[in-house]
């Protein structure tokens, strides 16, 4: 799959469209027109058609015969399901990282945390895009440090699928600061080669993210209900 994505024109179109869907550029039920996408990306319809078939296999697009391709996207339930699975897989990842991580990877994690802390201390406010990117980088390094190609692949895909939810969580400054502290604790457990503690802290980290997302969702629902009454 990764080889296909990297080497074929259809694979590159697939990666671009998947990113646009996950970032919210395309909304649920939006039609993805082959001719329009091909013109925008400067390719023929064939690689676009290949990309749409791959997106259908991932569940992000539904192709209706004789009608077209429509965005399915990631539902709120999908996000919660992914976080439930991530809780256990991130724990396993941290455990294996504590057993297999290299000194270079430890230094990369330390650097990522330092850069995150630097962002949070800026007088004119932190750059949310950069903090979100650093948060993702921390997890990416951990996935690679697990020593498992398959676990890295699964968690990387999960991370992509929930990136909009992740961004909304990091947008809350108090949560962003707490997340960095949790990353520091996970890193220390891994540095101490304590797989049990690393696994526990990684699971708790995901639970805290879920709790924060729940608060955001409840606040959003309350605001919608309030607007509906006005």
Image: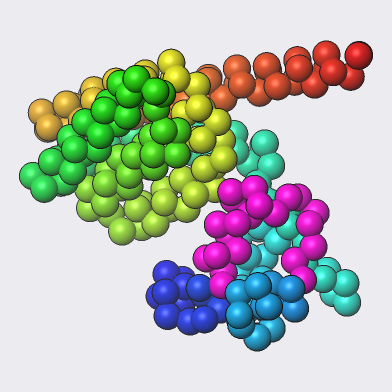
- Pick the front one: 97 or 229: 229
- Pick the front one: 73 or 112: 112
Q: Is residue 70 left or right of residue 138?
A: right
Residue 39 placement: quadrant? bottom right
Q: Is residue 213 magenta?
A: no
Q: Is residue 227 left or right of residue 79?
A: right
Residue 153's place in the image compared with 89, above or below, is below
Query: At 42% across and 80% down in the image, what residue appears?
Result: 7
- Pick the front one: 221 or 116: 116
Residue range highlighted in magenta: 13-33
Residue 168 placement: quadrant? top right
Q: Position of residue 192 (x, y in %)?
A: 10, 28
Q: Position of residue 77 (x, y in %)?
A: 67, 37
Query: At 27% across and 43% down in the image, what residue appears?
Result: 142
Residue 68's place in the image compared with 99, above or below, is below
Query: At 23% across and 23% down in the image, what residue appears?
Result: 185
Q: Is residue 47 left or right of residue 83?
A: right
Residue 177's place in the image compared with 54, above or below, is above
């Amino acid at each position: 799959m990764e080889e296909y994505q990297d080497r074929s024109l259809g694979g590159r179109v697939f990666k671009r469209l998947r990113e646009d869907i996950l970032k919210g550029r395309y909304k649920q039920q939006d039609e993805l027109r082959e001719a329009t996408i091909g013109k925008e990306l400067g390719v023929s319809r064939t690689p676009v058609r290949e990309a749409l078939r791959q997106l259908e296999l991932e569940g992000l697009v539904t192709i209706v015969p004789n009608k077209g391709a429509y965005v399915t996207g990631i539902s709120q339930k999908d996000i919660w399901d992914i976080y439930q699975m991530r809780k256990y897989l991130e724990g396993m990842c941290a455990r294996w990282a504590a057993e297999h991580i290299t000194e270079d990877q430890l230094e990369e994690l330390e650097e990522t945390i330092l850069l995150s802390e630097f962002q949070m201390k800026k007088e004119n406010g932190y750059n949310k895009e950069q903090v979100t990117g650093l948060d993702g980088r921390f997890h990416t390094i951990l996935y690679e440090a697990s020593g498992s190609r398959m676990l890295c692949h699964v968690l990387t895909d999960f991370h992509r699928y929930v990136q909009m939810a992740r961004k909304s969580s990091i947008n809350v400054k108090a949560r962003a600061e707490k997340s960095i502290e949790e990353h520091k604790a996970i890193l220390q457990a891994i540095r101490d080669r304590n797989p049990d503690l690393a696994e526990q802290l990684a699971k708790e980290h995901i639970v805290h993210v879920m709790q924060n997302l729940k608060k955001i969702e409840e606040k959003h629902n309350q605001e919608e209900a309030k607007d509906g009454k006005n």
